[in-house]
Every structure is written in structure tokens, then in C-alpha cells.
Amino acid sequence: MAEASDIASMRRALDLARRGEGRVEPNPMVGAVICGPGGAIVAEGWHDRFGGPHAEAMAIAAAGGAARGGTLYVTLEPCCHHGKTPPCSEAIIAAGIRRVVVAAGDPFPEVAGGGIAALEAAGISVEVGLLAADAERLTAPFRRLVTSGRPWVIAKWAVSLDGRLAAAPGGDRWISSPESRELVHRLRGRMDAILIGIGTALADDPLLTARPAGPRRALRIVLDSRGRLPLESKLVRSARDWPLLVAVGPEAAADCLLALEAAGCEVWREPEQDAGERLEKLLAELGRRRLTNLLIEGGAEVFRTLFNRSLVDEVHAFTAARRLGKPGDGLPQLPSPPPFEVEEVLHPGGDTFVRGLVGRPPLSGQADPESRSASA
């Protein structure tokens, strides 16, 4: 059983790691804490931005000579390869750290156990698995990208008490409260891409931008099998200022696609007839571009395809405290969503917001606070 001080230090490292959210992708969020030989924290660090110092290097630089003989707590296995920064394993060895406690291994092929092996080969005591489930959840989008080749998919919807995704024409455009919409804009601000179907684009004429802007500038995507997105839409008119990808199928007319491209849109064409297959291939393309977090904002048919193909990783669900429809009114309804584990419940502006996890994070570990030797 891990010592209480070990658990407290690793929890602190996890808290530090979250400071990099929206700034480090496609890298994972990582935090590090160094305790001196007496057990007191002497330095902290976190991965703050893509291309910047890793958490371990940041903590070692802050500790200076106080790191010698101490313990490093880090939420992810230290890297052992030359990328945008030198190997953290070499920095740890050079700092004279005698013990390293790692929450979870790194699935990235160029690391994947190599960082731990390098530390052990240098005579450093390494323990792996402390708060592993927490660390793997924190890095789940990175793990999804590395292990599956596609982004982490977040499905976001807002419904009325009677399950309607939209109000009747001519009614209030918004289902959810201003406070709920503020949460959505903050979510958009840390996404790599935001996707909607053509039905939502035609009905709502959205911009799909974060207001105010967040740390990331999301690629906006419209699933538009026939290339029907109007040139006068807000999405197309803003395409030269904010990237827009229109994903079309084989039936899209060539002249429509040329017009969209001339307006500044990127057109992604997939000859596959089946809409579900096209969506899966689009996710693979986004993965090749190393986009880590994808937000799906509807509509009903897009959600149905995602649910049927088990492509949703995380749910952000808003329920407004009002009813919008009546039987047979034809208003779109949310398809039956997959079961998910509730992680957070809030009540913004009288709405109910639920955030949850569908299934387990990729390469999930044990939830208990035990640690084990890396060589066990």
C-alpha cells in the first residue's frame, strides 16, 4: 500500500497537469512534483504548451541541487527519445534523483516502457501505478489518438425535458440557459475540431467559434454529403478567417464543391456511399492530422450514427427545465444515447448539465492507490 505522502504528492502532480489543458495537445497533460530526501516538496512542474519543456524538466530546473537524492512523482512515464525536447529520462538521471513514482505508462511507441527501463538501468528505484486510473483518465484523449488513430470524441447536446433537440420554427432559438451556453463556449475553446451535420447548419446557421476565444482554434467541420452548405452561411462567409472543412460524399456536385473551395473552405471528399463509413474515415483523417479532441454538436442523425457505431468517448449533456413539443409535432429528438458513467453534475442557470465517460479510457489501469515496482 502506498504511503499517504506518496498519494498526496501524486494528487498534486495530477492537479498541476490539468493546467496544460487545451495548450499541450496533441501531447498529453503531465504534472511532476519533486520531494527532497526529507519528504518536503522542493519543486513542481507541468507541461505548459506544445513544444515547451516537459513537466519533469520544468520541475528539475526549479529544484536545482535540491533534487539530488529526492523522489520524483510524475503522472506519465518519462520520455526517453529526442523529440521537440531532450529525453526526460536523461534529465532525471543527471539530477541525481534516487526514486521515481510514475502514475501510468506511456502508450506512445517511442516511449512505451523505455523510459522506465532507462531509469532502472541507471540504478533509480521506479514504482508504477500510483493513481493510475486518474492519470489514464487525464490523458485519455492522448491515449485514444495513439492507440486508435482517431480523436477523442465528445458528444454535446442540449435537450428539453421532453427530449427535443430544437424548438418549433419561429420560437426561441436557444433551448439552454446563457450560463449553459457559456460552458459550451469554454469547451469549444479547448477543442481541436467541432463537427455538425448539414441539417444543423441549415437550421441554425451557426458560427461554431468560441466566444471569447480559448487556447485553441478549432477546425469547424460540416458533414454535408451532397454539398448543400450555402455560400451565404456564416460558416462559409467566415471560412477565410476561421478554418472550415466540408465533408462530402460521392453525390456532391462538382460545381458546388468548386464554389465552396473558392470561398475559402476545405472540401474533403470520400467516395464511400455509407454515411457511417464516411464518418469513420473522416475520424481517421483527423487522427492523421493529430487532432486530439473532437466536439460533436449534432444533429440527431449525426448522433444516431455515432451511437450506433460506438464512436463516442465522452458526453456533455444539457437538459433545460422546460418542455418544447407535443406528440407528433415532428421536432427532432435525441436518439437513445449509450450508457455512460457520470463524472460531474452542475445546474447552470436552472438547467442540468451532466458530463460522463462512455466505457473506460484506453489502456485503463486499476483505480486503487497501490503502486508496484516497474520490474515486478
Image (spheres, grey):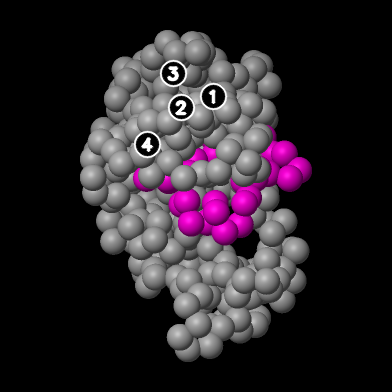
Label 4: which secondary element: loop
Q: Is residue 358 visible?
A: no
- In the image, residue 276 above or below residue 316: above
How many angstroms separate mark 4 from mark 3 (CA)? Answer: 54 Å
Q: Nearer the viewer, mark 3 or mark 1?
A: 1
Span highlighted in magenta in the image? 197-225
Amino acid type, callout 4? Ala
Q: Quadrant of the C terminus?
A: top left
Which disc is residue 89 wearing?
Answer: 3
Task: Give residue 17's position: percent from left, percent from top.
Answer: 58, 38
Q: Which residue is mark 1?
A: 262
Mark 1 Cα shell of 10 Å, populated few (<14), some (14-19), many (≥20): few
Label 2 close to label 4 by CB (< 8 Å):
no
* Residue 109 image position (x, y, % from top left): 29, 25
Of the two numbered discs 4 and 3 in the rendering, the one whose residue sits closer to the viewer? 4
Give the amino acid type for the residue marked by disc 3 in the picture: Ser
Label 4, label 1: how far apart the Cα atoms are: 15 Å
Real-space Cα separation, disc 2 to disc 4, in angstroms? 9 Å
The alpha-carbon separation of the residues under discs 2 and 3 comes to 51 Å
Residue closest to the eye, 208 or 83: 208
Q: Residue furthest bottom?
A: 327
